[in-house]
Amino acid sequence: MHQTGKGTKQQPGIVLIADDAEAGEQLAGLFRSDGFAVTTIGSALGAIDIIKRVRPDLVILDLALPYRSGASLLGSLKSDADVATIPVVIYTAIAETLTRERRALAAAVLEKPTDAGRLVDVIEGLLPAAKRHSPTPLQTRSTLPVLDCTGHAHQSAVGRR
């Protein structure tokens, strides 16, 4: 686990759960550079306890995790009264494996690869109004990275809307 903080009154906090440590840290770095406090977790083991301790504003969850599926973890998060209200964004290359019931528990489902700006837009839209950035450095770039199935960023010439 890599923790940089749980956010502040103005700084939004994110817990990122992904099995690929390198891709997770690269994605976390993208969010940190955009002003988020990010805690990364490499598996589902102990994730609920960490989320309870960190109290993030949002969780980003991959479905392919060691020891326990992300879909199972999502169900546990949403049935635990201490963390059930925290929005969970599913960010995965295997979204088609998510059942309709599990999909309904997520605040959003994004399939890899996706444009980093789109991911930030979704996250910003789920944050409390007081913690939203407007505009953020990432959102004002003319070329944004596209995140591939491993979470690695590649430059895209596609601008934002």
Image: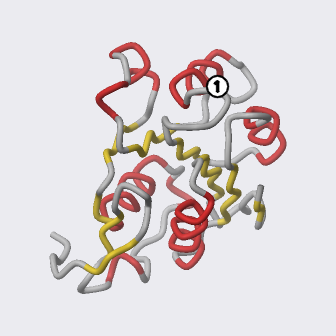
Q: Is residue 75 above or below residue 4?
A: above
Looking at the rendered image, the quarter that the C terminus falls into is: bottom left
SS of the residue at dot 1? Answer: helix
Residue appearing at x 33%, y 51% in the figure: 112
The number of discs equals: 1
Q: Position of residue 141 (x, y in %)?
A: 31, 85
Residue appearing at x 39%, y 72% in the figure: 153
Q: How is the image coloured?
A: secondary structure
Rendering quarter of residue 45: top right
Q: Position of residue 53 (x, y in %)?
A: 84, 42
Q: Is residue 53 left or right of residue 145?
A: right
Q: Which residue is mark 1?
A: 77
Q: Is residue 145 left or right of residue 33?
A: left
Q: Nearer the viewer, residue 56 or 41?
A: 41
Q: Is residue 98 above or below residue 86?
A: above
Q: Nearer the viewer, residue 42 or 50?
A: 42
Q: Position of residue 91 (x, y in %)?
A: 42, 45
Q: Is residue 29 left or right of residue 124?
A: right
Residue appearing at x 82%, y 34% in the figure: 49
Q: Position of residue 27 (x, y in %)?
A: 51, 65
Give, as a three-letter code, the residue at label 1.
Leu
